[in-house]
Image: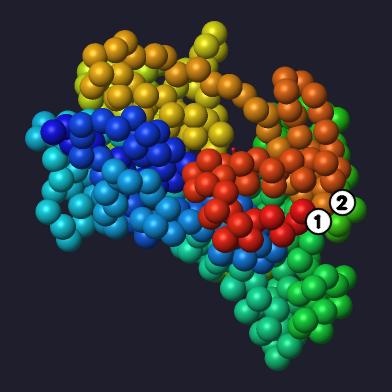
Amino acid sequence: MTDILILGAGYAGLRAAKILAKKKLNANITLINRNDYHYETTALASIAAGTLKTNKVVLPLPANLPAGIHFKQATVTKIDRPNQQVLLADEAPLHYDYLIVALGLVSEDYGVPGAKEYAMPIVSLDTALAVKQHVEKQFQNYQKSQDPDDLKIIVCGAWFSALEYLGALAARLPKLAAHYNIPLDQISVQCIEAKDNILPMFDDQLTNYVKDWLAKHHIVLRTGTPIKEVQANAVITDEQTYTANTIIWTTGVSGSPVISASGLENRRNRVMVTDELCLEDDKSVFLIGDVAAVRMPGKPFPYPATGQIAFQMGVCAANNIAADLNHEPRKDFEFNDLGTVLALGDRDGVAKVFGEHKLHGYLASALKRVIDDRSLIEQSGLKAMFAHGRFDFL
Ligand SMILES: Cc1cc2nc3c(=O)[nH]c(=O)nc-3n(C[C@H](O)[C@H](O)[C@H](O)COP(=O)(O)OP(=O)(O)OC[C@H]3O[C@@H](n4cnc5c(N)ncnc54)[C@H](O)[C@@H]3O)c2cc1C
């Protein structure tokens, strides 16, 4: 029997597992993931801000896997291609005939000194929860310390997830302030970004909408301000040192470090794959989601790393493995762009959908929930959606 290993149960890996299960192949299919649950990465900003509960973004594994998929909770340390095996922490290696690598993202610090040590990323369920708890702890401390830095939050980088975090945080702050008996106007939130502008995927109209929204919610956005260093409770730029007891790092992500540990040629742990999503020199190894780079047709650069693309790559890789086993031709990856939505809390946002159609306001934030819920529906089925209370907002 053919051994198919899928590494990572994020959007890409879980989708690939579901598609392979439907194909009823004569194969042993094993899905390996660090945790015994899948989480919605696109909802992590809301978890970090405390506006969404964990049980609404988590899908327990293996309970939500279809028949025919074996689940193994383990941490992958290396892919050993010469011996066609995957090395795991504290466990025996596993053999593969086909491999799907979908190990996702880690925070990218771009070599800024102190970023790893003193700033908190939002890249997994654990890190998002750590941010939420840290902010609450500082607000609680303030009652005794009266240290203004306990009420200061600096978000480093105005990457997509940073703005979603700021949007959700703005919605939560009035409640937090009331809970800890702190005047809202004593809380300071600022976002420091090296580039001169934000959100390159949107045009000026939508970008200005987001900037105005931040200003209206008393969030200071400093663009064109590269961060030189992060120290304990301080962010240092050319012009100034900004102090705060909460420093969050959201400048961007790179792929899993397992990629470089495995000797695969990469750029920021993303591997250039063929249009079929496999390695040029090894058609049995597929890389999908945030560890993969696929050149956009007619462009010199690859697709951005997004949940939507990861999801669709999962389908393509699974179909191509099934095609091999059924002696059919493989197909190239074709991205069907459903649009981009940035939520600003649960009542506002901006979106570009169906090509160049623009939306802002409540409709955009509602669309974000529909897209996240659609992904959960496809991953888990409607029964699990109701069990997770994801229709609360209807
Ligand atoms: C805060 C945040 C907000 C975002 N918001 C959006 C958005 O609104 N829209 C959008 O399209 N994209 C968004 N993105 C990007 C999107 O989430 C990613 O592109 C997508 O999650 C990539 O999917 P993936 O399956 O490749 O990886 P992931 O979703 O990261 O899944 C990887 C899986 O592998 C597991 N894993 C990792 N390492 C190991 C290991 N060594 N051993 C075993 N298991 C391991 C992880 O636990 C995880 O389950 C956001 C990203 C972040 C960080």
User: Residue at 84% of width from left, 38% of height from top?
Assistant: 360
For this orientation, the residue located farthest to the top is 298
Local SS, label 1:
strand
Q: Is residue 220 above or below residue 83?
A: below
- The answer to whether any part of residue 157 appears in the image is no
The residue nearer to you, when weighing 142 against 237, is 142
Q: Dividing the picture into quarters, in which one does residue 219 lie? A: bottom right
Q: Is residue 375 above or below residue 82?
A: below
The residue nearer to you, when weighing 28 against 203, is 28
The image position of residue 48, as x and y in percent, is: 61, 62
User: Residue at 83% of width from left, 41% of height from top?
Assistant: 363
Q: Is residue 203 above or below residue 75?
A: above
Residue for badge 1:
219
Q: How many other residues sit within 10 Å of disc 2, few (<14), some (14-19) or many (≥20)?
A: few
Query: Is 382 left, or right, of 166 in this rendering?
Result: left
Q: Are marks 2 and 1 in contact (CB under 8 Å)?
A: yes
The image position of residue 187, as x and y in percent, is: 79, 70
Q: Quadrant of the N terminus?
A: top left
Q: Which mark is residue 210?
A: none
User: Residue at 41% of width from left, 43% of height from top?
Assistant: 14
- Whole-angstrom CA distance, mark 2 to mark 1, is 5 Å
The amino acid pointed to by label 2 is Ala
The amino acid pointed to by label 1 is Ile
Query: Is 145 left, or right, of 42 in this rendering?
Result: right
Number of on-image labels: 2
Residue for badge 2:
215
Query: Is 72 left, or right, of 161 in this rendering?
Result: left
